[in-house]
């Protein structure tokens, strides 16, 4: 749970012009955008206040929770996502946590993999963790937030 910052001017063009659409309708557009990815959630709620999106509801796993956050936050016009999502099946033991990373100018998935894992050839791990939001490992953009999973041993 917490507040994550996103680059407001980057991301999927889902919302249209702010003055043209009411906030409740904009929240519904975001819900439909996230729903297309097929995440299984219980009672997922979207509340929009300006550029801050609040997410609440219950998700099965931490991985699904993080993917919903990046799918909703990587929308043009969203600068903050408040995470109130509850994980129904939290990880047991000391499982390493996933991280978030904001893509910088000049980044590639290989460069990010080298930074986090020490091995550029581990880029498919990051790509898979961000599917279905990412369709191609070569198509990332500055300001986009990615999930960086812990490497499984």
Image (cartoon, helix red, strand yellow):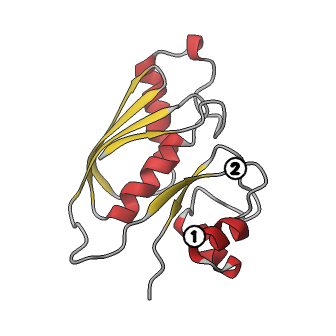
In the rendered image, which residue does mark 2 sit on? 104
- Most foreground residue, 112 or 81: 112
Dividing the picture into quarters, in which one does residue 107 lie?
Answer: bottom right
Determine crowd level at label 1: few under 14, some 14-19, many 20+ residues with C-alpha closer than 10 A.
some
- Element at badge 1? helix
Dividing the picture into quarters, in which one does residue 56 lie?
Answer: top left
* Residue 22 drawn above or below residue 3: above
- Most foreground residue, 41 or 53: 53
User: Total of numbered circles in the picture?
Assistant: 2
- Give the x, y percent position of residue 111: 71, 67
- Most foreground residue, 96 or 10: 96
- Give the x, y percent position of residue 135: 67, 61
Lateral position of residue 55 relative to residue 58, left or right: right
Earlier residue among tags 1 and 2: 2
Q: Residue shown at 44%/48% (left/top)?
A: 69
- Give the x, y percent position of residue 68: 43, 51
- The label shown at residue 116 is 1
Q: Residue shown at 33%/43% (left/top)?
A: 2
Dividing the picture into quarters, in which one does residue 143 lie?
Answer: top right
* Residue 108 drawn above or below residue 121: above
- The label shown at residue 15 is none
Lateral position of residue 79 relative to residue 13, left or right: left
Q: Which corner quadrant holds the C terminus?
A: bottom left
- Element at badge 2? loop
Lateral position of residue 9 relative to residue 146, left or right: right
Cβ–Cβ under 8 Å for marks 1 and 2: no
Residue at the far bottom: name it. Answer: 153
Alpha-carbon distance for marks 1 and 2? 14 Å
- Give the x, y percent position of residue 25: 45, 23
Q: Residue shown at 71%/54% (left/top)?
A: 140
């Amino acid at each position: 749970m917490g507040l994550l910052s996103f680059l407001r001017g980057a991301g999927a063009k889902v919302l249209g012009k702010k003055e043209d659409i009411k906030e409740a309708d904009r929240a519904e557009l975001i819900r439909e955008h996230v729903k297309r990815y097929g995440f299984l959630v219980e009672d997922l709620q979207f509340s929009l206040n300006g550029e801050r999106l609040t997410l609440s509801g219950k998700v099965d796993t931490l991985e699904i929770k993080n993917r919903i956050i990046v799918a909703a936050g990587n929308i043009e016009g969203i600068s903050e996502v408040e995470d109130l999502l509850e994980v129904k099946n939290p990880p047991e033991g000391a499982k390493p946590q996933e991280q978030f990373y904001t893509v910088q100018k000049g980044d590639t998935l290989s460069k990010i993999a080298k930074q986090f894992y020490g091995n550029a050839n581990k880029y498919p791990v990051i790509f898979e963790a961000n599917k279905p939001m990412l369709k191609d490992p070569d198509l990332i953009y500055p300001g986009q937030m990615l999930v960086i999973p812990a490497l499984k041993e």
